[in-house]
Amino acid sequence: MPTPDVSLLATKVLGLAFLLSLAFGAIGQRTHFCTMGALSDWVNMGDRTRLRQWALAIGVAMIGFWLLAFTGQVDPTKTLYASSRWIWLSAAVGGALFGFGMVLASGCGSKTLIRVGGGNLKSLVVFLVLGLSAFATLKGITAVLRVNTVDRAAVDFGAPAMLPSAIARLAGLELATAGLVAALLIGGALVVWALKDRDFLTFDNLLAGFGVGAVIVAMWWTTGHLGHLAEHPESLEEAFLATPSNRAEALSFVAPVGYTLDWLLFFSDKSKVLTVGIVSVFGVVLGSLGVALCTRSFRWEGFGGTGDVANHLVGAVLMGVGGVTAMGCTIGQGLSGISTLAASSFVAVLFIAVGALAAFRWQMWRIESAPAVARARPALAPDRAGLAD
């Protein structure tokens, strides 16, 4: 068997990951795909259109991932989310912090990058603060707090902590078969629910759901199949090229933002190499920028006042700390993680929603309890721009 050109293969992985994230950013800018926006539309206006976009994307990603597993393209036990430890408390606490923070910061990690590409300077500040707090929670002061508190509360199942593992044991099925059955049932139900509304069947909505879901599936194939080496020629061990975890990964936008800042700050350090997460960050921004320029929707936007600044700074910190603690954001856990049917992903997504809903209620309470004079001063009111975006 010929020895693979590892450097060339890693370049192919990075190049394809960049193109896929470019597509993700373009779709996000064109269709306004946004998890926080989906929840906001539903809670504040009773509009479920973007919620259906998100459900459709999850369904497509879930079915696509397990089709890859069933056909032997990807090993579901070797993804970032396939640990035997069910980190239920980390997922719950981190998810709630992230959900609350994304409302204050006018969008999640992916929406922040998309809005940076659209000229939003507030989101640029969020990007920087989110990256710093994420890196601190990976390797710094909040990492010590995380490891010594919530990360200690875990259940070790001795097998990948995912729904298909339980189904496989109970039904006597292979893991990939059990996963495909579960994905067809759960993911299929989400797809049917999204598509049953005739008003939803527009080009942008279908592009958002099918497009984003397909990007996640393609990312799984890129890192889990194209970049997989059963035996690295140098280490003689199994390897997944260009992933910091040395496991198959898909899109996520919290830890990769931290690693992006680290790569930029220590660029001359030869040990700092590009990963799929870092190129994905650049790809989303550039994809969004391209669509914003083509549609002439690019515009500079700044803060409305000190209250606006405070909301975004606090929100960015909560997203950075919460996203790393939960092992993902609305994309990292809400699409990539949940597509694998990992137990921790279900908990993280649930508590991201809980945190976001709590933040909506808190913002409304602030508005309603403020004196009439204060309500008339938009600079001091909670930022609402992201709720309509």
Image: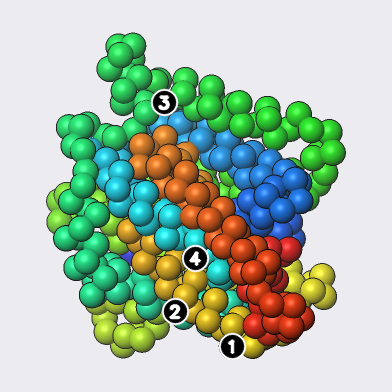
Q: Earlier in the sequence, mark 2 or mark 3?
A: 2
Q: Quadrant of the N terminus?
A: top left
| Residue visible at 27% across and 40% down in the picture | 86
Residue 204, horizontal then vertical, whole percent: 78, 50
Residue 367 rendering spot, x and y as whole percentages: 67, 69
Q: Nearer the viewer, mark 2 or mark 3?
A: 2
Q: Is residue 82 left or right of residue 354?
A: left
> How would you rate the neighbour count of disc 3 (Cα within 10 Å): few for under 14, some for 14-19, many for 20 or more?
many
Residue 175 position in % (x across, y down):
33, 24
User: From the viewer's perspective, is the residue at label 3 or at label 4 nearer?
Assistant: 4
Label 2 sits on residue: 129
Q: What secondary structure is marked by label 2?
A: helix
Residue marked by disc 1: 306
Q: Earlier in the sequence, mark 2 or mark 4?
A: 4
Q: Nearer the viewer, mark 2 or mark 1?
A: 1
Q: Taking the image as drawn, is residue 288 in sight?
A: no
Q: Residues within 10 Å of mark 4 (few under 14, many from 20)?
A: many
Query: Which residue type carries mark 2?
Result: Val
Distance from disc 4 to disc 1, alpha carbons, whole Å, reads 17 Å
Going 37% across and 56% down the picture, which residue do you hit?
A: 94
* Mark before the other along the chain sequence, 1 or 3: 3
The disc placed on residue 101 is 4
Question: Outermost residue toward the top?
Answer: 171
Report how far apart the C-alphas of labels 3 and 4 lie in the structure.
33 Å
Gap in Å between the C-alphas at discs 2 and 1? 16 Å
Q: Nearer the viewer, residue 1 or 81?
A: 81
Residue 292, image x and y in percent? 74, 72
Residue on which the image places disc 3: 179
